[in-house]
Image (spheres, rainbow, N blue to C red):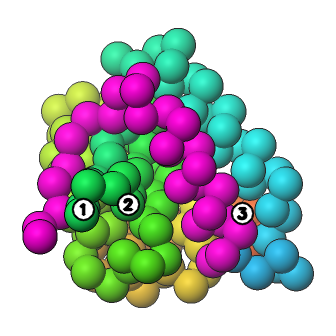
Amino acid sequence: MPCSVREATPNDEQQIRALLSLVIHESLDATVHNIPSILNNVNDNVDLWRTAPDNIVHLVAEMDGRLVGVIMIKEFWNFCSLFVDPSYQRRGIGRQLVKIAVEKCRGRCPHDVIYMHANNEAVDFYRKLGFEVNNTSRTPPAGSTEMKLRLV
């Protein structure tokens, strides 16, 4: 069964939060990443989406009747999360979510550039989608690399 992607709705909130927690706990190395801080951050972003949904691209992927992926880009330039259920990874779901979300940002992004802090293990994945390392003087959070995608 193929994956379907759609806008997140308030009815998805509980499943989104559960998926975020599952992926963070199963996929991130607690010796490198500050898991409690990451959980707080992604949950704060879900709270923000509930209050200001018009300024956020927030999509979910469904497969086999389950919510298996989620992506959020705030203010059409701040790529803050991409999570895919570990049992559904390597099936193109993350790639599909990124491509659709980026298209939704085109023409709405104030800088014509999307910025993110990518998990170091995902840098090659994002490079294949056109992102590049953004060399700045800022220090990204532990275990991550600052990246950008030019929209023009």
The reply to whether residue 112 is in sight is: no
Residue positioned 49% across, 25% down in the render: 49
Residue 129: % across, % down = 26, 73
Name the residue type under label 3: Pro
Q: Secondary structure at mark 1?
A: strand
Label whose residue precedes the other's in the sequence (2 or 3): 2
- Marks 2/3 in contact by CB < 8 Å: the verdict is no
Callout 1, which amino acid?
A: Met
**Crowd tier of the residue under label 1, counting other residues whose Cα lies within 10 Å: few below 14, some 14–19, many 20 or above:** some
Q: Is mark 1 in CB contact (under 8 Å) with mark 2?
A: yes
Instruction: Assign a secondary structure to mark 3.
Output: loop
Check if mark 3's residue and mark 1's residue have beta carbons within 8 Å: no
Mark 3 vs mark 1: give the one in front.
1
Residue 29 magenta:
no
What residue does disc 3 label?
140
Q: Is residue 13 magenta?
A: yes
Few, some or many residues within 10 Å of mark 3 (<14, 14–19, 20+)? some
First of labels 1, 2 by sequence position: 1
Q: Residue 132: x, y in percent?
A: 40, 73
Q: What residue is disc 1 on? A: 63
Magenta stretch, residue numbers: 1-27
To which residue does mark 2 refer? 68
- The amino acid at mark 2 is Val
Q: Nearer the viewer, residue 144 or 46?
A: 46
Q: Nearer the viewer, residue 128 or 98?
A: 98
Q: Main secondary structure of the magenta part?
A: helix
| Left or right for 77, reference 16 | left
